[in-house]
Image (cartoon, helix red, strand yellow):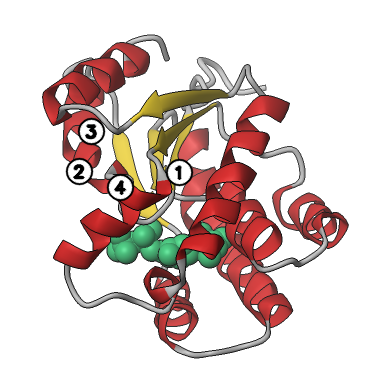
Amino acid sequence: MTKNPKKRGKFITLEGMDGAGKSTHIPNIIAALKARGLEVVSTREPGGTRLGEQLRALLLHDAMHAETETLLMFAARREHIANLIEPALKRGAYVLSDRFTDATYAYQCGAKGVPSHKIKQLEKWVQGKLQPDLTLLFDVPVEISIQRLTVAREPDKFEREDAKFFEKLRQAYLMRAKEDPARFRIIDANQALDKVKVIVKNIISTI
Ligand code: TYD
């Protein structure tokens, strides 16, 4: 045993439909954690490593079978965990990831129909016991999400899907949250940005 072993860091993930506004909150979350003197590693999925970012480019723009998509998401995730997430947690850093495995359950399973048992198998293989310590789910009604996306930039493949897809997505995310209430915080993101910021800040102060 080493003397003074470093306390393991925390793993925080952000989830929600495209247009729910989660990315807006990342700088504030980083600032709040850094103000406590913590090392913060901010990352995203798919991506987070050189290989992962190359896979992201394929995943977001190339049409493919939903199971191919699932496998590539987990390939990128394996790399992400081995090269970035796990080493950072080991040295005591707080890792903030813009999306993680809940997105695969929501998009590839809930919205695209890949059986959840297949995703569960990959999750076990790739993650072992690793799970986020806290997941913030930014929730908005589908119409709002679509409205926000139409005024945003050039949409990627997922952002061009229709309302039915988005509704399945939303329900799948809410179901995930219901199954693991200790890990999830559902944030009503359909209110003034300043209000959402306060809610996020309060939640972050608890971890
Ligand atoms: P997103 O997180 O919305 O990034 P940006 O804000 O830059 O658009 O984009 C990632 C997309 O990838 C998003 O549409 C959801 C999708 N995705 C999946 O379908 N499955 C997954 O497992 C992950 C991590 C993401």
Q: Are marks 4 and 2 in contact (CB under 8 Å)?
A: no
| Nearest to the observer: residue 70 or residue 179 | 179
Disc marking residue 15: 1
| Nearest to the observer: residue 75 or residue 137 | 137
For the residue labelled by badge 2, is the local secondary structure a helix, a strand or a loop? helix
Q: Quadrant of ligand 1?
A: bottom left
Q: Are marks 1 and 4 in contact (CB under 8 Å)?
A: no
Amino acid bearing label 3: Ile
Q: Measure the C-alpha gap from mark 1 to mark 3.
A: 16 Å
Which of discs 1 and 4 lies nearer the camera? The answer is 4
| Badge 2: residue crowd in 10 Å (few <14, some 14–19, many ≥20) | few
Q: Measure the C-alpha gap from mark 1 to mark 4.
A: 16 Å
Tell which circle, 3 or 4, labels the residue nearer the N-terminal end: 3
For the residue labelled by badge 3, is the local secondary structure a helix, a strand or a loop? helix
Vertical order, 17 against 33 (above or below): below
For the residue labelled by badge 4, is the local secondary structure a helix, a strand or a loop? helix
Residue that badge 3 annotates: 30
Which of discs 4 and 2 lies nearer the camera? The answer is 4
Residue that badge 4 annotates: 144
Does the rendering let one see residue 47?
Answer: no
Residue that badge 2 annotates: 24
Does the rendering let one see residue 201?
Answer: yes
Vertical order, 115 against 33 (above or below): below
The location of residue 2, given as percent across then percent down, is 60, 23
Quarter-wise, where is residue 206 in the image?
Answer: top left
> In percent of the image, x 52 and y 35: which residue is there?
90
Tell which circle, 1 or 4, labels the residue nearer the N-terminal end: 1
Tell which circle, 4 or 2, labels the residue nearer the N-terminal end: 2
Q: Measure the C-alpha gap from mark 4 to mark 2.
A: 16 Å
Quarter-wise, where is residue 128 in the image?
Answer: top right
Q: Measure the C-alpha gap from mark 3 to mark 2.
A: 12 Å
